[in-house]
Amino acid sequence: MKTTDSKKETTTKKAAPKQTVAKGVTKPKSNAAAGLAELFEDSLKDIYWAEKALTKALPVMAKNATSPELIDAINGHLIETEEQITRLEKVFELIGKKATAKKCDAMEGLIEEGKGILEETEIGVVRDAGIIAASQKIEHYEIATYGTLRQFAETLGYQEAVTLLEQTLDEEKGADKLLTEVAVNAVNLEAAELE
Ligand code: FE
Ligand code: ZN
Ligand code: FE
Ligand code: FE
C-alpha cells in the first residue's frame, strides 16, 4: 500500500529525466531549437543583427582610415552589406518567417575589439593596419556563418536561399581578399617603417 510520501517520490522520479541534464551540459531554454529548420531561422536572426550592426560600424572604420585604398574597400563593402541585409530579408520571406534581428554576441565583441584598436593606434598607416586586422576578423566570422547557413539551406531544400546566401558568402570572401591586398600593397610595409 502506497503512502502519500512515496507517491510524491514517484512523481519526482518520473519527471526527472526531462528536466535534468548531465553535469556540464547546458540546459536548453524553453524556446530552444528542436530541428535544423529552427536552428537555421535562429542563425539568420543572428547574422541579420550582425549585418545591421556593421552598417553602423563600417562608417566609423572608414572615418578612421587614412589609406585611400582602405577607405574605398570599406565603403565598397558598406554598399555590399546593405545588399546583404536585403538578401537576408528575402531568405526570411522564402522560409515564411518575419525578418527579425537577435543580438549576435560574437559580432558585438568583434566590433568592440575594432573600436579598441582605434584607441590603441596612432592615426595613419598603423591605425590602418589595425583596422584591416579587425575587419578581417569580422569577415572571417561572416564567412564561417554564411558557409554554415548555405549548407543548412541546402539540407532543408531551400534552393533559392542557397543562391542568395552563396552570393553573400562570395562577397565576404572578396572583401577579405581585398583587405589582404590593401594590407600587402598599401599599408603594412609603411607601418613597419614607423617606430
Ligand atoms: Fe556581411
Ligand atoms: Zn553572428
Ligand atoms: Fe552569433
Ligand atoms: Fe562583410
Image (spheres, helix red, strand yellow):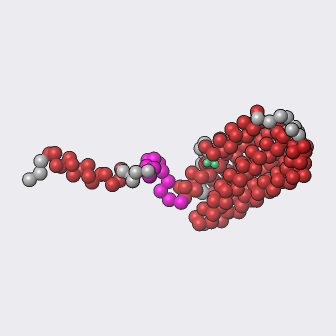
Residue drawn at x 72%, y 43% is: 54
- Magenta stretch, main secondary structure class: loop
Q: Is residue 93 above or below residue 192?
A: below
| Position in image of residue 26 (x %, y %) | 45, 50
**Numbered label tally:** 0
| Position in image of residue 150 (x %, y %) | 65, 61
The stretch of residues the image draws in magenta is 25-36
Q: Quadrant of the C terminus?
A: top right
View extreme (front): residue: 195
The quarter holding residue 146 reads bottom right
| Position in image of residue 122 (x %, y %) | 83, 34
Please check the rendered image and state whether residue 94 is part of the magenta-colored stretch, yes or no: no
Q: Is residue 56 left or right of residue 154?
A: right
| Position in image of residue 185 (x %, y %) | 90, 52
Please check the rendered image and state whether residue 28 is part of the magenta-colored stretch, yes or no: yes
Residue drawn at x 87%, y 45% is: 192
Residue drawn at x 82%, y 39% is: 127
Front residue of this view, candidates 132 and 82: 132
Q: Is residue 151 left or right of residue 67?
A: left
Q: Is residue 143 left or right of residue 10?
A: right
View extreme (left): residue: 1
Q: Is residue 28 visible?
A: no
The quarter holding residue 194 reads top right
Residue drawn at x 62%, y 52% is: 44
Q: Is residue 166 visible?
A: yes
